[in-house]
Image: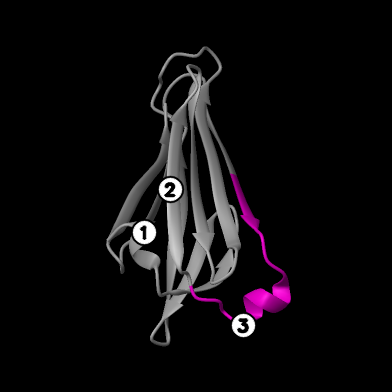
Amino acid sequence: MTCKDLIGYQLVSIDDNKIVVRKDNAEYILNIEEDHGDCCGYNDIEAKLLISDTELNRNPVITNVEITNEEDGCGTSGRIAFFGEYKPMAVVDTYSSSGSGWCYGACVWVYCDALEINEEVSSW
């Protein structure tokens, strides 16, 4: 599976370390992992809930997932956006780079063994 296959799952919670989804009364944790690589590599990770806690408590269904990735010459930014029926519900924004600008292997990925998801979000 990929993150795009989460359409039809319910969003339960999200933070900088994990995304929790539910389907058929089973909850799954998608871990947000990072590796700084060598030398001066680094990652910035920010997960944002774009709906109110009241809306989240209704466990809204994911109707679309968009994944973007863009290199700017000094690093790579990545975004996973989860959409509900009417609007965006949550995003995970990442940026992988290094203090020197050289590629040292910094990387952010999302994985869940139970769903067989292991997807890179950003790397440098």
Task: Give the left or right position of residue 35, taking residue 2 as reference.
Answer: right
Q: Residues within 10 Å of mark 1 (few under 14, many from 20)?
A: some
Element at label 3: loop
Q: Is residue 41 visible?
A: no
Q: At which x and y percent is residue 111?
A: 37, 56
> Of 10 and 43, which appears nearest the observer?
10
Residue type at mark 3: give it: Arg
- Residue sitting at 42 percent across and 87 percent down? 25
Q: Which residues are magenta?
A: 46-61
Q: Earlier in the sequence, mark 2 or mark 1?
A: 1
Relative vertical location of residue 120 with respect to residue 115 in this rendering, above or below: above
Q: Which residue is mark 1?
A: 4
Task: Give the left or right position of residue 85, taking residue 105 as reference.
Answer: right
The tag on residue 58 is: 3
Q: At which x and y percent is residue 97?
A: 50, 25
- Residue sitting at 43 percent across and 37 percent down? 69
Residue type at mark 2: give it: Ile
Q: Is residue 64 magenta?
A: no
Q: At which x and y percent is residue 5?
A: 33, 64
The tag on residue 67 is: 2
Label 3 to label 1: alpha-carbon separation: 21 Å
Label 2 to label 3: alpha-carbon separation: 24 Å
